[in-house]
Image (spheres, helix red, strand yellow):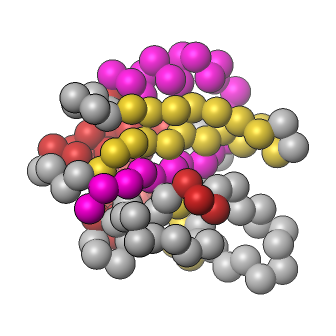
């Protein structure tokens, strides 16, 4: 497995500060993180984590990033995309159904970041499951 995951949230925290904090948590040789916004989508921040190779410490690092983003998200909500091909997905799109998942579900075969994950799907990570990490 090798690809990326994208997380979406609302926050008033400066992008550079978020990038600095995420970089401290998502760190390993060859790993990168990107924090960015889209001008046409106000108030939404996106964080893409490259790359997932299947190493055991990825789960712990990912969970640390998830907890941090939850702590700075305005409403506590963090959304997950298996890869960045389809981010952002706008909730107002008529066919869009956002499924709620638990944080521990992210590393199951059905939801893990993957090159073959090219599905236009956005998931809401359960606030309770993030708090339980």
Q: Residue at x 38, y 54 (%)?
A: 3
Circle count: 0
Q: Residue at x 61, y 41 (%)?
A: 46
* Nearer the observer, 77 or 54: 54
Q: Is residue 91 above or below residue 127?
A: below
Q: Residue furthest right?
A: 40
> Compared to 56, does 120 lie above or below?
below
| Residue 57 x/y as whole percent | 15, 44
Vertical placement of 24 versus 39: above or below? above
Q: Position of residue 73 (x, y in %)?
A: 59, 39
Magenta region includes residue 127: no
Q: Quadrant of the N terminus?
A: bottom left
Residue lying at the far bottom in this picture: please name it.
Answer: 95
Q: Assess whether residue 3 is covered by the magenta stretch.
A: yes
Percent position (x, y) of residue 111?
A: 38, 71
**Residue 72 appears in the rendering:** no
> Magenta segment range?
1-24
* Residue 32, placed above or below residue 127: above
Left or right of 44, for residue 128: left
Q: Position of residue 10 (x, y in %)?
A: 68, 41
């Amino acid at each position: 497995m090798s690809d990326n995951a994208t997380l979406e949230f609302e926050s008033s925290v400066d992008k550079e500060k978020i990038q600095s904090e995420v970089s401290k948590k998502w760190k390993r040789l060859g790993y990168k993180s990107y924090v960015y916004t889209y001008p046409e989508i106000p108030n939404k921040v996106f964080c893409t984590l490259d790359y997932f190779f299947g190493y055991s410490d990825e789960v712990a690092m990912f969970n640390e990033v998830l907890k941090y983003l939850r702590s700075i998200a305005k409403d506590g909500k963090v959304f997950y995309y298996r890869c960045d091909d389809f981010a952002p997905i706008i909730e107002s799109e008529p066919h869009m159904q956002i499924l709620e998942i638990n944080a521990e579900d992210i590393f199951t075969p059905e939801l893990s970041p993957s090159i073959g994950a090219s599905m236009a799907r956005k998931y809401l990570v359960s606030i309770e499951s993030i708090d339980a990490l």
